[in-house]
Image (cartoon, rainbow, N blue to C red):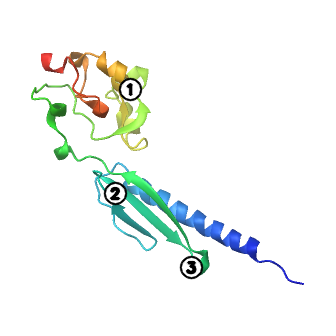
């Protein structure tokens, strides 16, 4: 009587895929939104993505022989402050009460701290991997109908939505 080893092989590949996937997710999470250039590890290699700024992919491999499994994930580094265009491409210089955060998370600011400057970002910046997004720029419509004079920090051209129509009038 002969038995198939196909279930064992499938289980081994699935285990190796799980290890490779975990390594890729952890690797990407370590560098996502940071300024550090990623290096290679024993199981993972990273490389810059073509035609993109600060975007990388990581490929992690686990297993040997016919059971080897690889996973590729993409991630993006933070944009360095010195690479940012002052005032979103506008020649107008405005002064704001607070410094614009280096990076934003995917979370909106709570209503009790609409810009995150009254303690919210201090508490959650690391956990959320960046500052909260002010309700003023949560949508493009909210951004266009906002008043730059009421902004607590510079969000002109946020999300690539262009210079605010009233930005130069300040």
Report which quarter residue 63 is drawn in: bottom right
Report the residue at 60% width, 78% height from top: 66
Report which quarter residue 143 is drawn in: top left
Report which quarter residue 93 is drawn in: top left
Residue ID for mark 2: 49
Residue ID for mark 1: 138
Residue 121 is tagged as none
Q: Is residue 73 above or below residue 150?
A: below
SS category of the residue bearing label 1? loop
The CA distance from mark 2 to mark 3 is 27 Å
The CA distance from mark 3 to mark 1 is 47 Å
Q: Position of residue 84 (x, y in %)?
A: 19, 41
Which quarter of the rendering shows the C terminus?
Answer: top left
Q: Earlier in the sequence, mark 3 or mark 1?
A: 3
Q: Is residue 66 above or below residue 153?
A: below
Q: Is residue 109 left or right of residue 144?
A: right
Q: Position of residue 8 (x, y in %)?
A: 73, 74
Within 10 Å of the Cα at label 2, are there few (<14), some (14-19), or many (20+) other Cα atoms? some
Residue 64 is tagged as 3
Q: Position of residue 107 (x, y in %)?
A: 43, 33
């Amino acid at each position: 009587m002969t038995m198939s080893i196909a279930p064992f092989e499938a289980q081994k590949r699935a285990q190796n895929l799980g290890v490779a996937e975990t390594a890729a997710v952890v690797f990407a999470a370590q560098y996502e939104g940071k300024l550090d250039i990623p290096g290679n590890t024993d199981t993972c290699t990273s490389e810059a993505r073509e035609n993109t700024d600060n975007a990388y992919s990581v490929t992690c491999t686990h297993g040997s022989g016919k059971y080897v499994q690889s996973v590729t994930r993409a991630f993006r580094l933070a944009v360095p402050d010195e690479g940012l265009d002052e005032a979103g491409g506008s020649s107008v210089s405005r002064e704001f009460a607070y410094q614009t955060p280096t990076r934003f998370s995917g979370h909106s600011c709570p209503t009790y701290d609409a810009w995150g400057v009254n303690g919210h970002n201090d508490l959650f910046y690391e956990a959320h991997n960046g500052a909260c997004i002010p309700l003023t720029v949560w949508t493009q419509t909210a951004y266009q109908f906002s008043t730059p004079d009421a902004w607590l920090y510079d969000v002109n051209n946020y999300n690539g939505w262009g210079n605010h129509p009233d930005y130069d009038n300040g």
